[in-house]
Image: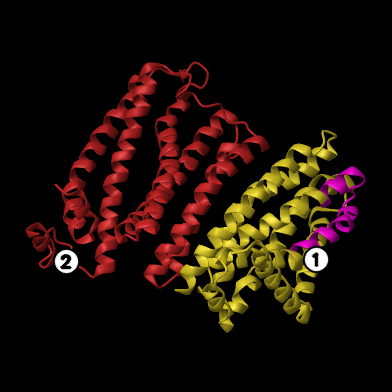
Amino acid sequence: MIWSKYSAPQAFYPLAGRLIPWFAAVAVILMVVGLYMGFFVAPTDFQQGESYRIIFVHVPAAWMSMFLYVVMAIWAGVGMGLNARLSFMMAQAIAPTGAMFTFLALLTGAMWGKPTWGAWWVWDARLTSELILLFQYAGVMLLRTSIDDVRRADRSSAVFALVGVVNVPIIYYSVQWWNTLHQGASVSMATGSKMAATMLMAMLIMTIAFWMYSIAVILARVRCVMVERESLPTWDEKPAAMPEAVEAR
Amino acid sequence: MSHSSMWDSISGIIRRDLLLAMRRWSDAAMSVFFLVIVVSLFPLGVGPEPAVLRTIAPGVLWVAALLTCLLSLSRVFTPDYLDGVLEQMVLVPQPLSLLVLGKVLAHWVISGLPVVLLSPLLGLQFGLEGEALGVLVLSLLLGTPTLSMIGAIGAALVLGVRGSGLLVALLVLPLYVPVLIFGAGAVTSSMAGIGGEANLSLLGACLVLSLFLAPWATAAALRIALE
């Protein structure tokens, strides 16, 4: 099998269509399992009570928001380097999902902050850098929509995404030195986890669920982008002209 | 390319941009007045309490410096874009990133340097004195070139795009956050008596990093805008 053939939108469109249901199904199953474990199986936190359970959504969402930005920047970089249309389409498709997770992380963070810290919002380092990440996603998306020429829109927002990826760590550390109230990371590669095993398991399951959800949604959106850009004939799984020709190749 | 011709191309661009700016000095004067007016609005809004003003002074002055730089960004490339000079710059044998560096330095002299020179006066209005005032000037001297460098990337990206004035603010302001934090932090920590050296060093690091990376990204953005 030659993977590079799928770098052509015509070939990728039906492939994405076949993959979406699988990723979506895995996402739904894992989300149900993860939420059940998180809300009913995991023990109550002795300090924070039941309100800590929002982390089963909050932490995976925050992880995905940062991870998706990097993935978007990688696709943008690949697009700039190889001049591949599909890479730019992927970068375009990732941005809204990344922004959604960033917003979700901020929202659930606020819901957790109210009972725990006594305030919906504090100017804490992680909150602030997450907020700025949201601004960066907004910048990428708005820059794209402001430019009518598709080629320029692709490449300009790619440059901005890449500039942002250099800036995100600097912003992160600058706000961290500026002010921090957020509790330290409970899960780290170096020291292992300080959490109960079921809590960690539920959180990891939710992370994989969000990951699968992202892939399904991004593939669906990239198909929309293709239809929009290439004026594909239908929404149908097998548009009259295209995939057949590719399968035959 | 020889060392001297590289320097010649940068200094040529700087000379040209400064000459053009002097011929239209009202543009530069507008930035300065904007800065003074914005800074003067804060005591009117917050109240004339000296202790409060002294506390907010570093943040206010730095945010005003950011906005001043932001508003003058459209003058970096747009005139040359409109009259076709920019296309010639892309075609000359000198690397575009060098010419960009020259243009950004000229932009800093026109819009950043006046902010630095004026800052002691504005600081005095807010009751800063002694070492804090010196650190304020130093932090702006180190920070404003970085603002011009980062801003040029945004200015190049939105060249000729509709609604570019607001869009460039949206793109550039989040990127300015570290400079704001380190710049205002330097002044605040020197007021608190712990010295601003650490923040000033970080500002210097930001400047070096942006000198190294920003012209390159700006040149890429200009090529995209012009193709």
Tell whether position B122 is magenta: yes
Going by the numbered disc 2, the residue's amino acid type is Thr
Camera-nearest residue between A116 and B140:
B140
Identify residue for label 1. Answer: B37
Q: Of the numbered discs in the image, which one, if any, rests on residue A234?
A: 2
> What hue represents chain A?
red
Crowding at mark 2 (Cα within 10 Å: few <14, some 14-19, many 20+): few
Q: Position of residue B216 (x, y in %)?
A: 55, 59
**Occupied quadrant, residue B27:** bottom right
Marks 2 and 1 in Cβ contact (< 8 Å): no
Going by the numbered disc 1, the residue's amino acid type is Ile
* Badge 2 and badge 1 both on one subunit: no
Would residue A183 be seen by someone viewing this image from the given angle?
yes
Instruction: Point out the image quarter for the C terminus of chain A.
Output: bottom left
In the displayed image of the protein, which residue is found farthest to the right?
B130
Tell whether position A144 is magenta: no
Q: Which chain is yellow?
A: B
Q: Which residues are magenta?
A: B112-137
Chain for numbered disc 2: A
Would residue A123 be seen by someone viewing this image from the given angle?
no
Q: Position of residue B136 (x, y in %)?
A: 82, 49
Q: Of the numbered discs in the image, which one, if any, rests on residue A178?
A: none
Q: Residue at x 61, y 68 (%)?
A: B99
| Alpha carbon separation for disc pair 2 and 1 | 57 Å
Camera-nearest residue between B207 and A127:
B207
Q: How is the image coloured?
A: by chain
In the displayed image of the protein, which residue is found farthest to the front?
B2
Q: Tell me if B68 is positioned left or right of A151 in this view.
A: right
Chain for numbered disc 1: B
